[in-house]
Image (cartoon, rainbow, N blue to C red):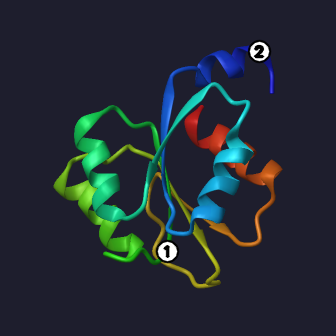
Amino acid sequence: MGRDEQADLHGKTIVLTIVQDDVRDGIATALRGLPVHIQEAHNAHDALRVLEEMRVDLIITETQLPDMHSLQLIYKIKETLGFRQLPIAIITDDNYTTPPMPTVEYLMRPISIAQIRQRVCDLLL
C-alpha cells in the first residue's frame, strides 16, 4: 500500500462486530499497521450504539450475531438509521447467495490476514 493510500485511510473508523474474542482479536491484529481506529462491538446493539455516537466508515460483522441476524443489522443501519452508503463487510462460513446490496460485501471463511487488509482498504478507499 502506497503512502497516499495510507494517508487516505488516516482517521477512518471501523466497527468490528464479532462475537468470539479470538476472531475479533485476529481481525484487529490483521488491521494493525493501518492508520485506522478500531471500535469493538460484541453484538448488533453495541454496533448500532456506536453508529449513533461517532462517525463510522466501515462495519465488519458476522452473519449471525447473538441479538440479530446480519441482514436485520444491515436493514437497521441502511433504512432505519439512514446510513445507506456505509460499507459493510460480512464474514461468513455460508456459501449462499443473497440479493446484491450496494456497499455490502461478503467475505468467505477462511480468510487470510492479507485478504482482510486488502478488502478493508478497497472498501474504505
**Type of amino acid at the residue the image marks with label 2:** Arg
In terms of secondary structure, where does tag 1 sit? Answer: loop
Q: Quadrant of the N terminus?
A: top right
Residue at image location 71% in from the left, 72% down from the top: 109
Q: Position of residue 9 (x, y in %)?
A: 60, 25
Quarter holding residue 89 = bottom right
Q: Position of residue 80 (x, y in %)?
A: 17, 56
Q: Is residue 108 left or right of residue 80?
A: right
Residue at numbered disc 1: 63
Q: Is residue 51 left or right of residue 39?
A: left
Is 85 situated above or below 89? above
Residue at image location 56% in from the left, 36% down from the top: 124
Quarter holding residue 20 = bottom right
Counting residues from the start of the chain, the first of labels 2 and 1 encountered is: 2
**Type of amino acid at the residue the image marks with label 1:** Thr
Question: Dot 2, crowdedness within 10 Å: few (<14), some or many (≥20)?
Answer: few
Residue at numbered disc 2: 3
Q: Quadrant of the C terminus?
A: top right
Quarter holding residue 112 = bottom right
Q: Is residue 17 left or right of residue 79?
A: right
